[in-house]
Image: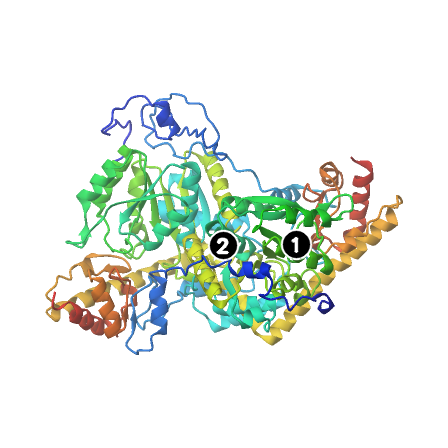
Amino acid sequence: MASTMLSLASTTPSASLSTQEILKGKARLGSGRVGTLLNKEKGNPFIKAKSFGRISMTAAVNVSRFEGVAMAPPDPILGVSEAFRADTDVKKLNLGVGAYRTEELQPYVLDVVKKAENLMLERGENKEYLAIEGLAAFNKATAELLFGADNPVIKQQRVATVQGLSGTGSLRLAAAFIERYFPGAQVLISSPTWGNHKNIFNDARVPWSEYRYYDPKTVGLDFEGMISDIKAAPEGSFVLLHGCAHNPTGIDPTPEQWEKISDAIQEKNHIPFFDVAYQGFASGSLDADASSVRLFAARGMELFIAQSYSKNLGLYAERIGAINVVCSSSDAAARVKSQLKRIARPMYSNPPVHGARIVANVVGDPALFNEWKAEMEMMAGRIKNVRQKLFDSLSAKDKSGKDWSFILKQIGMFSFTGLNKTQSENMTNKWHVYLTKDGRISLAGLSLAKCEYLADAIIDSYHNVS
Amino acid sequence: MWKCFSTRTSRCFSTSASNKALKWWDHVAPAPKDPITSVTEAFLADTSPTKINLGVGAYRDDEGKPVVLQCVKEAEAKIAGCDFLESVSSAVSSKLVEESVKLVYGKNSDIIKEGRFAGVQALSGTGACRLFAEFQRRFYPESQIYMTDPTWSNHHNIWRDALVPERTFHYYHPDSKGLDFSALLDDVKNAPDGSFFLLHPCAHNPTGVDPTEEQWREISYLFKVKNHFPFFDMAYQGFASGDLDRDARSIQIFVEDGNVIGCAQSFAKNMGLYGHRVGCLNVLCNDAKQAVAIKSQLQQIARAMYSSPPIHGILLVSGILSDPNMKALWVKEVKAMANRIQSLRTTLRKSLEQLSSPLNWEHITNQVGMFCFSGLTPEQVDLLLREFHIYMTLDGRMSMAGVTTGNVNYLANAIHEVTKFG
């Protein structure tokens, strides 16, 4: 029954749209332009206001209901990669990417992953649904990796572990849980932090505020500011901490500082919430990189920990991670786990199987596990080497006497160079070095061969541009 | 090195701060079990050799075993050891979306040629529905969603968690065990203009009751007049008639009538990719420019939920759909799955009739797709579980995919036993 000019057959009179009807986004064919959606009272930021006009409809097709949908702002990090791809200069260098590259600046598939996948292919495993909480073997392996297999929290079954879609998905499950069970509680996030943290808490409707973290004067940690802000927050807030290799700054608290952070959190009865996206990638040791989390757990605190295997196993695209909630009793852990499942079911029903199997196979096989540890050390080692080379180049070339040692003190994939927005733009425009506007570079995208060039670019941008 | 700094390992449960911490989770009650997955859990725990799982809608072969389709095995072999893709590159993701929407609109559709749709991959059908529900609330914050009575249980959870209130509309007629068509039309008519409706384009879950093509035409016309928004959840394309194109016919009728629609697709069942979570969401738009805007919003919703979808399933699906030979093989395999289910429907009905059951079992063969809404009461369902170790959801929904030539007689006998007294 294809229609051309459709006469209205509805029971209500086809009068011109009242403002009320426009505001509610309702539309009638034949009487006006459809889809004006203006929600002034709620100030919906997603809808662009359009003026109401009258164009008679002759099209056979109903006009889209989503006429007023504005273009979402582009992702700041992806934009860097796109601009890099478009650049034709041979000297170009992409330090925006948060993904590990070899010395030849190629993506790297870990050998253990290839081996695990071959094993899986040979076994010809089925593709049935996982349980809502994910693959049991994976959940066991991931909790043990985080806490150590003989940790009391594991032995006493006090950890609720649910497989999630990498770090993002795991954070979102936790955020939804916080919104549901701690309505009104806020999350304190570091200033700065990974860009997507805010999106996650916003969409989960969890209020957040920032604690001081990065000190531009020292290009280091504003420890006093951090402690002060944690203590000033309302009791029972959630404090989002990066377990190791802080993103974007690369600045981690020292062990003594972690103790004091834990003191402050306990004093205010806050809940620590760790984002562990780089376990193994910071120091090269999986255990050492988990020490901040283990310190908090050892104090008997209850805490949230989101994990990701995107970087340390190179499983970026498989979306494999977990949310862990350490509770004071196994009964509480069971209840918390059941509610996390209830949040996951209407989001995606059950998590993807492939990445979980890879992790379970790698961690579960002693030979593969040892191989993984070695590859981990190699990757972290390469990053430490480029840091050293970059520092050496900067110190040798820069005659101003500026202290560049923060490059060595920072850890993990990223470094905050201390360059401001204009200086960062100079890096790109003049030197074809791509980084994010906050001055963050990814050491994972840097080769030894390019360190000297990068040093020249940084020195020029720092001294000659304001 | 760390040991010298852990001076407070003994601080456990003794300070007032920790005592307060003990109270954090007291108010967290145990969640009720999911009505569908809990059936499988109970089934797995059962040690009876005669047990049958008619719970979850997952296909089984005639031995009751899960199946990995041949086309999938071939696709797996192809991608093993291939150049690794770090995150879902736009090339790969567009390929999946392109091929998926061809299944919905037909490969020669103008919609595809003109780019008049916003399409994104999604975490199977659930993820596609959730993305849409969030999108609906973001841009129509006052709107509701009309769902069939009954519908898949998780639909209620999805729109509820997206904070979109739901209403139901008449669908299933318990007396006829068929469609309550006139009540359905009344509800569509009486809903406020411009309402959002959730429709099953084929193989309705849980009832297996689908409108006829003529009935779909009437519904579509009414939708057009009322300017309602139809959102289709297509989880079983290919399972209703065995023919993928035919199963998408209802959607195409709506589109031909000029309705502007949205559609969630799942590859869990028809490609057997359950655990890989691969599906697609598309929303029809006025033009390609609007499509870009809407897609950007959908991606932004996804970004804060899981960033990007898992790649393995995407590679399998796009590999199969873009290779003519593999796609042809897939089409055959879907038909075979649908045929097996169809033949067991016939066998089950015949067996019950041969047992001189006092009840009418026509609906077993009238209903289509994976499920049969048996009409069994919760008491009868419970009896089947306890006496016969036969598992299904309490609403009497049986997944026919779990029926085999080996167990159909046992099943018929069991159903007869619990129903012979009416």
Q: Nearer the viewer, residue A284 or B239?
A: A284
Identify residue for label 2: A173
First-in-chain label (1 vs 2) = 2
What type is the residue that disc 1 sits on?
Ala
Q: Nearer the viewer, residue B63 or B384?
A: B384
Residue A104: image location, x then y, percent: 71, 57
Residue B396's label in the rendered image is none
Q: Say which of marks 1 and 2 sits in front.
A: 1
Residue B58: image location, x then y, percent: 35, 63
Chain label for disc 1: A
Q: Secondary structure at mark 2?
A: helix
Q: Quadrant of residue A418?
A: top right
Q: Secondary structure at mark 1?
A: helix
Q: Is residue A191 visible?
A: no
Q: Please say if A463 is above or below B71.
A: above
Residue A105: image location, x then y, percent: 69, 55
Q: Please say if A373 is above or below A231.
A: below
Q: Nearer the viewer, residue B135 or B238?
A: B135
What type is the residue that disc 2 sits on?
Leu
Identify residue for label 1: A264
Display coloring: rainbow
